Image (cartoon, coloured by chain):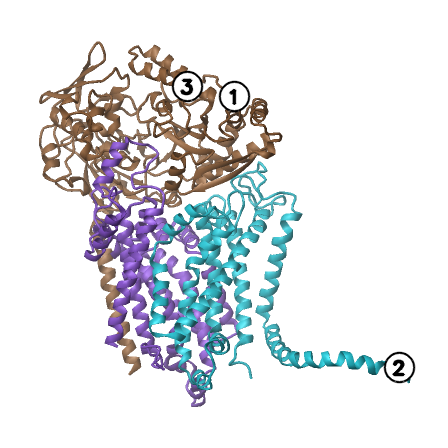
């Protein structure tokens, strides 16, 4: 196991290097500049700006600088938000996104797995149809529409929740639900489908033959095996959700990290693009590593060392 | 008497053919018949199928039969649904009914194409990665991780520098990352299936990789694959509206469900029908696909087959 | 066994998330309390704590008067810093930190006499603070993007572009209270400029002690305006408090201004309807296109003139739009009034010239062309097609480019329909992301492209100057005209206002006869406010001085 993890850490480093490289060249290829505006200023000033931020260096120097930045986790000053450090921007906004993200994930997993289990237990009966319909609605109505609807009806028309802002738990409920709903729908569908598969496995039949109750079988046996595809999906999903959703933060005016992923790119704020990308990559790569490790706990037959039969 | 002789001749010629096809068809008829029977017993699945057919027919014929064109500005702005405009009009005074069906063409095309591409790449990538294991697995999955981590917005902006806007580059943009989810889920399934007894048995019997993937792994991962596909279609429809925002989608005034829904979303308070109709048709379509998918899954489930 | 493990895992997870939740919200809650307290007392209408709740669209990128280029930073800065001159509630220039000023006979020397006033740290505001700030902005090392607004000052341009010395800049603090400014040429709008944000003073001592003084609220954020920056939670909110040291503090009504950062327009409209904010409209948010009808219907929508123009640039280097008659046809065949009534909805005015009617001297229509002149457009198209050897209008396909936004897209589609109906030509719409779009315009990689221009100061020159040469970074059309440039050059040195106005109008006439741009409409500023808010409206440059605002 230790060997496996060490090997994976090495792959994570390689992947990170590739990500930084690809992102760097994409940034260079994308038209625009952090200082572009509809009001031009003299070329001398632009030159000075480029010099200040090291943008007039040859590409290999800039590339080297980004690699050093990444290695030392210091991404430098934002080019758009004057004199603000990228690290500060991330560290200020990430706790907000993380809090909201965890709340959303708990909701999504809780509701999703529950609905999936119910649907599978009552296969092709009313509860199945109901759960499936709700899940399909969740999948097909994207979070930005749902967020707008919830904000309009629950917050504005009914006054049950604040319209926007981030000043306490109350403020997090609608955005967390908006994020959770579509993921819950998909988790429910996945759980249902793999529960159904497990239901026809020999060990479930065996358990039934032993006279165990429906729910006991679910929790003792089926669910554990059925969660495998769900956990596959949860790894990258968690990485995405805890680093914030641009659209949800935009609609509910939440000072989270999600906006920086999008705004840094539209602003061509190169340092922030690189900082947020590396930050997200690390979370993603570790989330996926954890998923792979979880596999072996859930299903001992899975051997991570791989190719050896 | 003479008739008998003629018949004999004919029988000889046709007989050889008939025998051969009979042999081939016999097996598959019974298999597909079984699948079809089971599928047709599933009311929800049949309903979904009919719904899909109706939507497809409307997408083909409604724009032709309507008196308006999708781009006609009729001078009636933001009108609620009425006898003249069944689904109302939008902010430029265009008939939403005809735009919905015109948009269905684009959105259905995109959704289905994206789903098929994701299916092919994702299933192959995931099953090869899971089956091979070890370094191959590691490298293949890290490639998927890199694609997930590189900022997609930036990729699309750069893609636009290289390609002219249109349907093809949009499909390319959708396919860059679309398949990754599928690959991860299929890999997970393969990892758990590949060490099960029957797969081990097949291996010992000398089955090759292709045979393993096609005959054992995919059928057993089918549930997860179909569920993932039902997610792919709506996400492709809405990614298209995001790509339109960047200028990569179909150019205005052409409509798609995704762009209509995201524009209508802003008019939620003033003209809710502009959101309601595209959203309801997206949901109906996904529901239909989903019902058909579930029905297919049940019908094809190897464990349900006796 | 397994059950226990799972339970343990769940417990750990729950504890973990609770801790996180606590720190995620925790930082906010204490401020939240104070904010709510303030709100309560505000609504109970105790005269002692007048409060105003606003939103801005984004985190201000630069809360430094010398570095700010955007409207959000500008909106805040003009209430934090006090220039030599300021605006009154209607946007007229009035005394600020300077009590009086003299202008020499040749209009080249301005002498400002400062009043006694203090910085928030107790230092007196001196003429030297202004000299320091202006030279700071001009210093090429500081790469201020708006430094060019200081160019009317003698030697400023040379110093900023690295061709002259700092001593050559015509700004000198004669003594603590007297600032003498020497201009390169008579600039009739110079007093307007002095009220612009780039001309704000800086406290040299503080600025030099901490070069990052402007990144956070606190002791180092030293200002001299009617309000002080009390708290600044990045990407979340800003609180301004009344500055008791401000020279005119007796006339400032508001005690506290809470400014949230909300980008989403639908959200801001809902917040206003929900009573959470007192005012909505540029620069404090903006009214979503889809909400205009609703506010119009209940009679709360207000409009103010705004010195800006929305126009379509026409690429004069292109094969098709290079033809002046084609450009004329495209310009004439737009139903501006229909567009404004049905699509733009903001009671804008059809633009029949390049200089908005909000600019003094340009209130009347100059009669260059008529709105929706289909006959004229058809004749021009006919002539243009002949010159280009095109037989049928349907052979012409115009590419209409714009940066992605719902409003730009709607306008483009409306005009597309105009052109197709009136001229029979086809149009392809081409939207792109803002930065990509800017690059397209700059490289003349377009045929027709949308752009807006807002005045920095109340003078026609700001709308005409960009077309003086094809090389001008803001031209983007490839158009130039020697006569036009000559008239503009004359207008700079002309000291007589009436003659100068005449020169500018002649120049405008030349440009409009060759159509490097198709003006669409002159902007308006739309806003809604609570009934309790008094004296709050944007002036024609879009400024709102919060010192005049009162709430009842």
Residue B3, labelled with which disc?
2
Give the chain of mark 1.
C
Residue B210 picture location, percent across and down: 48, 75
Chain identifier for the cyan-coloured part of the image: B
Quadrant housing residue C68: top left
- Foreground residue among A220 and C465: C465
Mark 2 vs mark 3: give the one in front. 2
Q: Residue A50 appears in which quarter of the rendering?
A: top left
x, y (%) of residue B18? 72, 79
Please say if the residues under marks 1 and 3 sit with CB atoms less than 8 Å apart: no
Question: What is the number of the mark on residue C508?
Answer: 3
Question: Which residue is identified by label 1?
Answer: C370
Local SS, label 2 = helix
Q: Does residue B210 lie above or below C248 as drawn?
A: below
Tag 2 subunit = B
Q: Seen from this angle, which residue lies furthest bottom? A: A210
Q: Earlier in the sequence, mark 1 or mark 3?
A: 1
* Residue C489 visible from this viewpoint: yes
Place of residue C488 in the rendered image (x, y in percent of width and height, measured from the top left): 35, 17
């Amino acid at each position: 196991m230790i060997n496996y993890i060490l090997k994976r850490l090495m792959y994570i480093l390689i992947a990170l290097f590739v990500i930084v490289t690809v992102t760097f060249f994409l940034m260079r290829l994308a038209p625009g500049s952090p200082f572009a505006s509809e009001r031009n200023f003299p070329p001398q000033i632009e030159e000075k700006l480029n010099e200040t931020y090291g943008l007039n260096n040859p590409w290999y120097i800039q590339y080297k600088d980004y690699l050093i930045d990444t290695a030392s986790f210091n991404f430098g000053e934002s080019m758009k938000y004057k004199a603000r450090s990228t690290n500060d921007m991330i560290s200020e906004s990430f706790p907000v996104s993380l809090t909201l993200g965890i709340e959303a994930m708990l909701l999504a997993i809780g509701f999703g797995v529950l609905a999936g289990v119910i649907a599978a237990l009552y296969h092709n009966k009313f509860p199945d149809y109901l759960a499936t319909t709700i899940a399909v609605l969740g999948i097909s109505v994207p979070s930005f529409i749902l967020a707008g609807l919830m904000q309009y009806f629950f917050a504005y028309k009914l006054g049950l929740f604040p319209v926007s802002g981030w000043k306490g738990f109350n403020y997090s409920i609608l955005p967390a639900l908006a994020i959770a709903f579509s993921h819950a729908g998909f988790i429910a569908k996945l759980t249902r489908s793999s529960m159904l598969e497990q239901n026809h496995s020999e060990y479930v039949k065996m358990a039934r033959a032993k006279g165990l109750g429906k729910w006991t079988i679910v929790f003792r046996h089926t669910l554990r095996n059925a969660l495998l595809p769900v956990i596959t999906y949860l790894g990258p999903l968690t990485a995405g959700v805890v680093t914030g959703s641009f659209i949800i933060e935009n609609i509910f005016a939440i000072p989270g990290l999600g906006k920086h992923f999008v705004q840094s790119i539209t602003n061509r704020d190169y340092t922030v693009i690189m900082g947020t990308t590396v930050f997200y990559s690390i979370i993603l790569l570790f989330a996926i590593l954890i998923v792979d490790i979880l596999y072996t706990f859930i299903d001992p037959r899975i051997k991570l060392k791989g190719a050896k039969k | 008497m003479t008739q008998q002789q003629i018949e004999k001749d004919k029988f000889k010629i046709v007989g050889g053919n008939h025998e051969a096809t009979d042999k081939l068809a016999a097996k598959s008829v019974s298999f597909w018949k079984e699948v079809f029977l089971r599928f047709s017993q599933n009311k929800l699945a049949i309903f979904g199928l009919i719904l899909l057919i109706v939507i497809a027919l409307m997408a083909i014929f409604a724009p032709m039969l309507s008196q308006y064109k999708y781009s006609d500005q009729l001078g009636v702005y933001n009108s609620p649904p009425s006898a003249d405009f069944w689904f109302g009009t939008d902010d430029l005074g265009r008939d939403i009914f005809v735009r919905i069906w015109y948009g269905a063409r684009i959105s259905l095309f995109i959704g289905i194409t994206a789903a098929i591409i994701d299916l092919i790449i994702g299933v192959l990538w995931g099953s090869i990665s899971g089956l091979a294991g070890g370094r191959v697995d590691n490298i293949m999955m890290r490639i998927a991780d890199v694609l997930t981590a590189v900022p997609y917005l930036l990729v699309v902006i750069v893609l636009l520098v290289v390609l002219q806007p249109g349907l093809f580059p949009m499909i390319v943009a959708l396919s860059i990352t679309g398949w990754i989810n599928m690959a991860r889920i299929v890999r997970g399934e393969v990892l758990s299936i590949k060490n099960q007894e029957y797969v081990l048995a097949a291996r010992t019997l000398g089955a090759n990789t292709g045979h393993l993937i096609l005959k054992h792994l995919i059928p057993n991962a089918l549930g997860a694959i179909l569920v993932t596909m039902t997610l792919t279609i709506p996400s492709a429809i809405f990614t298209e509206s995001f790509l339109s925002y960047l200028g990569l989608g179909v150019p205005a005034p052409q409509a798609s469900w995704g762009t209509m829904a995201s524009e209508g979303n802003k008019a939620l308070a003033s003209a809710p029908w502009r959101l309601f109709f595209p959203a309801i048709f997206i949901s109906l379509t996904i529901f239909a696909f989903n019902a058909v998918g579930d029905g297919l899954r049940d019908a094809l489930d190897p464990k349900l087959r006796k | 066994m397994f059950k226990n493990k799972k339970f343990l895992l769940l417990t750990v997870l729950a504890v973990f998330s609770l801790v996180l939740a606590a720190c995620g919200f925790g930082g906010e809650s204490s401020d939240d309390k104070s904010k709510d307290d303030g709100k309560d007392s505000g609504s109970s209408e105790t005269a002692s704590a007048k409060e105003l709740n606003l939103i801005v669209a984004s985190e201000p990128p630069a809360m430094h008067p010398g570095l700010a280029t955007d409207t959000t930073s500008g909106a805040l800065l003009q209430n934090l810093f006090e220039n030599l001159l300021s605006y009154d509630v209607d946007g007229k220039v009035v005394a600020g930190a300077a009590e009086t000023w003299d202008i020499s006979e040749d209009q080249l020397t301005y002498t400002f006499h400062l009043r006694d006033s203090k910085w928030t740290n107790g230092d007196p505001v001196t003429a030297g603070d202004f000299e320091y700030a202006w030279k700071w902005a001009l210093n090429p090392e500081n790469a201020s993007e708006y430094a060019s607004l200081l160019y009317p000052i003698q030697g400023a341009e040379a110093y900023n572009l690295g061709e002259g010395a700092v001593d050559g800049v015509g700004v000198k603090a004669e003594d603590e209270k007297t600032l003498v400014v020497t201009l390169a040429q008579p600039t009739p709008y110079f007093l307007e400029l002095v009220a612009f944000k780039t001309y704000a003073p800086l406290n040299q001592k503080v600025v030099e002690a901490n070069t990052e003084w402007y990144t956070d609220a606190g002791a180092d954020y030293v200002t001299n305006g009617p309000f002080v920056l009390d708290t600044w939670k990045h990407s979340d909110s800003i609180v301004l408090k009344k500055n008791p040291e401000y020279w005119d503090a007796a006339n400032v009504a508001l005690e506290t201004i809470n400014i949230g950062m909300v980008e989403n327009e639908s959200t801001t409209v809902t917040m206003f309807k929900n009573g959470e904010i007192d005012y909505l409209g540029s620069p404090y948010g903006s009214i979503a296109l889809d909400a205009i009808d609703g506010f119009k219907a209940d009679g709360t929508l207000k409009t103010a003139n705004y010195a800006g123009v929305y126009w379509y640039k026409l690429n004069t280097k292109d094969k098709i739009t290079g033809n002046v008659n084609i450009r004329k046809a495209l310009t004439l065949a737009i139903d501006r009034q229909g567009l404004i009534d049905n699509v733009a909805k903001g009671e804008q005015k059809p633009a029949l010239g390049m200089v908005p009617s909000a600019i003094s001297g340009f209130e009347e229509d100059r009669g260059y062309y008529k709105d929706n002149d289909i006959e004229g457009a058809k004749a021009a198209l006919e002539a243009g097609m002949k010159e280009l050897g095109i037989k049928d209008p349907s052979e012409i396909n115009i590419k209409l480019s714009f940066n992605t936004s719902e409003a730009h897209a709607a306008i483009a589609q409306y005009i597309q329909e105009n052109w197709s109906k009136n001229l029979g030509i086809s149009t392809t719409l081409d939207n792109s992301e803002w930065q990509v779009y800017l690059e397209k315009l700059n490289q003349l990689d377009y045929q027709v492209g949308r752009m807006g221009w807002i005045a920095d100061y109340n003078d026609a020159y700001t709308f005409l100057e960009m077309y003086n040469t094809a090389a001008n970074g803001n031209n983007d059309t490839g158009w130039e005209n020697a006569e036009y440039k000559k008239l503009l050059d004359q207008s700079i040195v002309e000291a007589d206002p009436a003659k100068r106005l005449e020169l500018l109008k002649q120049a405008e006439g030349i440009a409009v006869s060759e159509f490097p741009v198709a003006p669409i409409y002159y902007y308006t500023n739309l806003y809604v406010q609570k009934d309790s808010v008094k004296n709050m409206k944007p002036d024609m440059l879009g400024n709102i001085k919060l010192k005049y605002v009162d709430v009842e």
